[in-house]
Image (cartoon, rainbow, N blue to C red):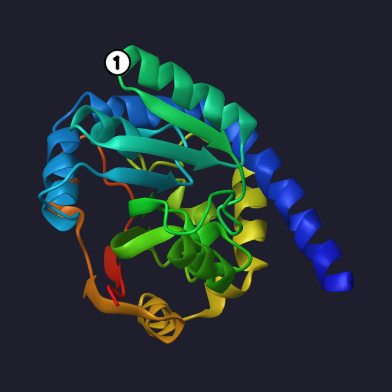
Amino acid sequence: MREENGMDHFEERNRGYWNQRSHAYSSLRRKELSGPDRKAWEAFLLERLPKGRPLHILDAGTGPAFLAIILSLSGCTVTALDFSSDMLKEAAVNAEREGAAISFVQGDVMNLPFPDDTFDAIVTRNVTWNLPDVPKAYASWLRVLKKGGVLLNMDTDYGPMDFTVTSRLAKNAHHGVEGSLIQLCQELKDSIRISTHRRPAWDVERLLSLGFSEVTLEKDIRPLVHLSKEWDYDPAPLFCIRAVKDRN
């Protein structure tokens, strides 16, 4: 019970953080959509997703719907889930502005509210670093994928990073964020187990142990998707893990 209450407290504080960050974070992603990174992300995703059939894709932890918008406008059927109500409001505005048809759901990425074998693919960007129980999330994602379905997990090993330092970098995504919010983000990150693991090697091992197959790792995709000269994003690599649900 103590552990469950601790997780509930974390989720409450974490949701509050992202609700407060929602508008500014959405503005960053809209700026990213207006630049060269948009086409770069589209090419990157479509090259790694299943081919030859219409796809129903889940954007897990969609935030302002950056990936969801790109995939919807490329012809995919997209469901986008997030636990932050304010972030979902931003996502809906962004989708309408872009003319993207997306089904938005408020829910927990660690306990997805969908039937087994629902999606052809799941995409997620900078989400797993922020979860108190990543193995639970991976198991839930495996469950809702169809046989042969693909998971694309793009994330950064934020564990060793000090956000109070990186926020001082002029082109960093945290630049200009209120100091108390940066401190809260740092405290939340440091309080969860994923921050202590050696990523992404730990993730690869965990996905294989859960039953994913064909797990491949790209250690740093920044040169492929971060083309804008306006942003440095993070000083740490952005990795991509591609994992396939067993076809048998």
**Foreground residue, 205 or 163?**
205
Q: Secondary structure at mark 1?
A: loop
| Placement of the C terminus among the 4 image quadrants | bottom left
Q: Which residue is mark 1?
A: 99
Number of disc labels: 1
- Can residue 237 be seen here? The reply is no
Which residue is painted at 31% across and 35% down in the image? Answer: 77
Answer few, some or many: residues within 10 Å of disc 1's Cα (few below 14, many 20 plus, some between 14 and 19): few
Which residue is painted at 28% across and 70% down in the image? Answer: 244
* Residue 147 x/y as whole percent: 32, 66
- Can residue 164 be seen here? The reply is yes
Location of residue 46 with respect to 88 vertically, above or below: below
Location of residue 127 with respect to 247 vertically, above or below: above
Which residue is painted at 39% across and 20% down in the image? Answer: 94
* Residue 142 x/y as whole percent: 44, 67
| Placement of the N terminus among the 4 image quadrants | bottom right
Q: Tell me which amino acid carries mark 1.
A: Gly
